[in-house]
Image (cartoon, rainbow, N blue to C red):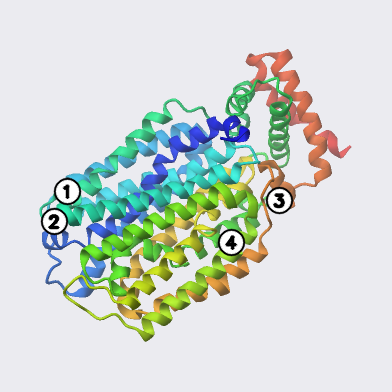
Amino acid sequence: MSSSTFKNIRVYGLACTIYWGILLFGYDTGVAGGVISTKAFKTAFGLINAPQKHVDAVSSNVVAVLQGGAFFGALASAPMSGWIGRKPTLLIFISIFVVGAILQTAADAGTRGLNMIYVGRVIAGLGVGAISAVCPAFVSECAPKEVRGRITGLFQIWVATGVMLSYFVNYGMAKHITVGPRVWRVPFGLQLVPGGIMAFGLLFAKESPRYLARSGKTEQALNNLAYYRRSTVDDPEVRAEFAEIEATILEERESRAGLGMKEAFFGPGNWIRFVIAFTIFLLQQFAGQNSVGYYAPRIFQSIGYTGTTPSFLASGVYGIVKVIATALFIFIGVEWFGRKWSLFFSALWMGIFFYIVGALQKTHPPVVRTDDYVSPASKAMAGVIYMYCVAYSFGWGPLPWVYVSDIFPNRTRHYGLAFASATQWLFNFVISKITPTLVSKLGWKLFIMFATINILGMCTFSLLIPETKGKSLEEMDIIFGAISAEDRAKDISKAEHVVDDEVHHRGPAAAGSSDQDVEKGSISQRSK
């Protein structure tokens, strides 16, 4: 373990604690597609002899209602996390998730049970959506700039791990439990385990120092920052970092008094960040990965893995490839290659591999068989899909979350992450609704469509955005033109004197009130 890793071990610990909720993100989105493809589920809910259109509708509904709930959960998290803090918000929404998971697990067969699953997944979605918005903000606000990309990028490792676990849970169920309500109760019930671990771990987590500083709790913010840096409040590096945080907050208070929705979106340097957040998640959802992720058994059946067990096993291998590739990129590549060029080459190779899959499926269409035989052409297509997964994991999988966690300023970060997460869940919902129909109607053309989006849309977008590797969160205002580098340097110098006065001379009782005094005059002197 490197010295920097050991120094930041508490931030890694925070990430590994709250990212149990992100594992739910991956598990919840992956498990449903497998459950609804089982014969026992179709029998219990009247889908065996139903028209394919009805089967597609139920399949997409079971998957998509979670995304619908997550969209509203992500939006609701913004005002709440800005008002009561990151930690209390996560505790509230993980409790909401648990209620939804219990409803899904308790559902019986029949129409009433299906409606119970729908309701449970909507409620669970509220929790997952909020967690997906707040967790990256929480972690990025506690992480130092040198390793922020790596620590924030753990998000995608936990998503990928959750997806992988869901595939192997489905595979295990297909092998050992094939009849009765346990076919859906066991997979849905297992969601409660990571939810409980996250809730317990949160009880011992410390609040974000940036949130505390913005709330006027200066001494507690400085103490928490020192805690996450495994140092003391008198450490020059800690005090310099905190001075930069304070300078940013004071600038925002001077120029953005009374933050409203208009200012949050259209304040200096803000609107382009929201455009980037919207576009990056729109493109990510139409990259093709989520169609494969949600309906992996169905996708692998479409390319020739016709038996239930082979399709589940192929899906499980896909999950393993995704976890390993994501981990390699996060721990080695994200701080080495940066954000911009990783996104570009990731999209380029994704498009190339999906063009190959589409061409193979066109020239070697899978033959429908009743046994578990898989043709060489189908194995080749599966192999190329696995290579596509590696390309996705080396850029467009983890980096959208890393990038949007980078770019927003302190005072609008909760709005920015909530907006980004809501965008992700909105188009997640769209993809989960339309994928069964696209698979049925388009066949090989589905992969050609995604490949074209990868190369024409995502490669071009990657070239237009600024690099954020190695920059502090406070430096993003300079990158996006909200303030000049010269003015920021002056404000940091003034903030260092303010912090000294608050912590060492005025004492903790006055620390909260001092923000108002500084807000009235310290930064305004810059223009004189």
Q: Which mark is residue 465?
A: none
Against 375, residue 258 (above or below) is: above
Type of residue at label 1? Answer: Ala
Q: Nearer the viewer, mark 4 or mark 1?
A: 4
Q: CA distance from mark 4 to mark 1?
A: 42 Å
Type of residue at label 3? Answer: Pro
Left or right of 440 in this view: 527: right
Residue 259 in view of the camera: no
Residue sitting farthest toward the right: 528
Residue 364 in view of the camera: yes
Disc 4 marks which residue?
343
Against 262, residue 381 (above or below) is: below
Q: Earlier in the sequence, mark 3 or mark 4?
A: 3
Q: Observer-nearest residue: 26 or 355?
A: 355
- Give x and y (percent) for residue 213: 63, 29
Crowd tier of the residue under label 1, counting other residues whose Cα lies within 10 Å: few below 14, some 14–19, many 20 or above? many
Disc 3 marks which residue?
268
Q: CA distance from mark 1 to mark 2?
A: 17 Å
Disc 1 element: loop
Q: Nearer the viewer, mark 2 or mark 3?
A: 2
Q: CA distance from mark 3 to mark 1?
A: 50 Å
- Say which quarter of the image contains residue 244: top right
Q: Quadrant of the N terminus?
A: top right
Q: Residue at x 84, y 43 (%)?
A: 486
Q: Which mark is residue 107?
A: 1
Disc 2 marks which residue?
178
Crowd tier of the residue under label 3, counting other residues whose Cα lies within 10 Å: few below 14, some 14–19, many 20 or above? some
